[in-house]
Image (tube, grey):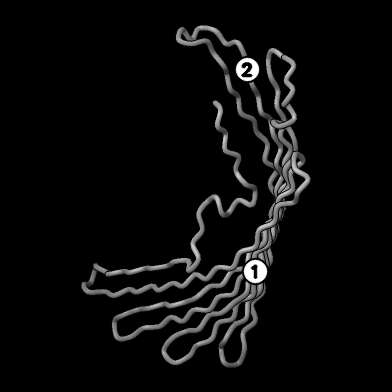
Amino acid sequence: MDYVLTFHDKSTLSASALYEHANLIGSTLNKNINLPDKNMVFQQVINPYTNPISGYRFKLDHSISIGTGKLESGYQFRSDHQDGKFDYEVTPNVPQSDISKFRGTAKSTNHINALYSQYGGKLSELQYVAGLRYEYASREVILSSDTNHHHLDQSNLFPSINLLFPFKETWNLKVDTANGCNETIIFELNPIPEENIQKL
């Protein structure tokens, strides 16, 4: 759903809303075989799962001409929820005391609030756009195997600069740069501590 309002000064205010849903279903199959001959499967493990995800997004954007350029600013809210169920099946079926570690549910909820502003224009032949985006993200994960709820909050800034300069009729020089002031590694994005397995 989209809506655009144009004012007397030719500035615009636009709003949009989007809802999405996907029902993710799948499985993985692992076969344990004898080595080194590899001519017999003595155990087969199947991990079926269902992981439906629902999400929605709301955007509000304002655009106005200032000087020789255009100032664009806006707000965005995104939210999604996942409700995963994971199973564990072994053939032949043998007693396994720790089988509960391989089965269960995982629910996650993500909320992201973002503000941005950018100004773009043209100086002689040089076209430029410079902007800054701020994001506040909140994530919660609930596991059936863990009584603790895992929560993670993050704030990030993302500056960006784009330059375009034509120096021939068919050639353009383009420079883009965008970076997060607070970069994170994959482990930091996961609120669940990883388990170090010493014994293989």
Which residue is at 38% across, 68% downward? 177
Quarter residue 11 falls in: bottom right
Q: Quadrant of residue 5?
A: bottom right
Q: Tell me if mark 2 has few (under 14), some (14-19) or many (20+) residues whose alpha carbon lies within 10 angstroms of its own.
A: some
**Badge 1 or badge 2: first in the primary sequence:** 2
Q: Where does the image place residue 118, in percent across and percent down from the top left?
A: 49, 79
78 or 62, which is in the foreground? 78
Q: Is residue 7 visible?
A: yes
Q: Residue at x 53, y 79 (%)?
A: 117
Provide the secondary structure element on which disc 1 rests: strand
| Kind of residue indicated by mark 1 | Asn
Q: Residue at x 34, y 74 (%)?
A: 163
The residue where tag 1 is placed is: 113
Mark 1 and mark 2 residues within 8 Å of each other at the beta carbon: no
Q: In the shown orientation, is residue 162 left or right of residue 153?
A: left
Task: Judge whether 152 appears above or below 98 on screen.
Answer: below
Residue 123 appears at what percent x and percent y?
33, 85
Q: Nearer the viewer, residue 61 or 131?
A: 131
Which residue is disc 2 drawn over?
44
The quadrant of the image that shows the N terminus is bottom right
Q: Is residue 185 above or below residue 171?
A: above
Is residue 86 found left or right of 135 in the rendered image?
Answer: right
What residue type is disc 2 on? Gln
Q: In this rendered view, identify the residue nearer to me: 114 or 180.
A: 180
Q: Residues within 10 Å of mark 1 (few under 14, many from 20)?
A: some
Element class at badge 2: strand
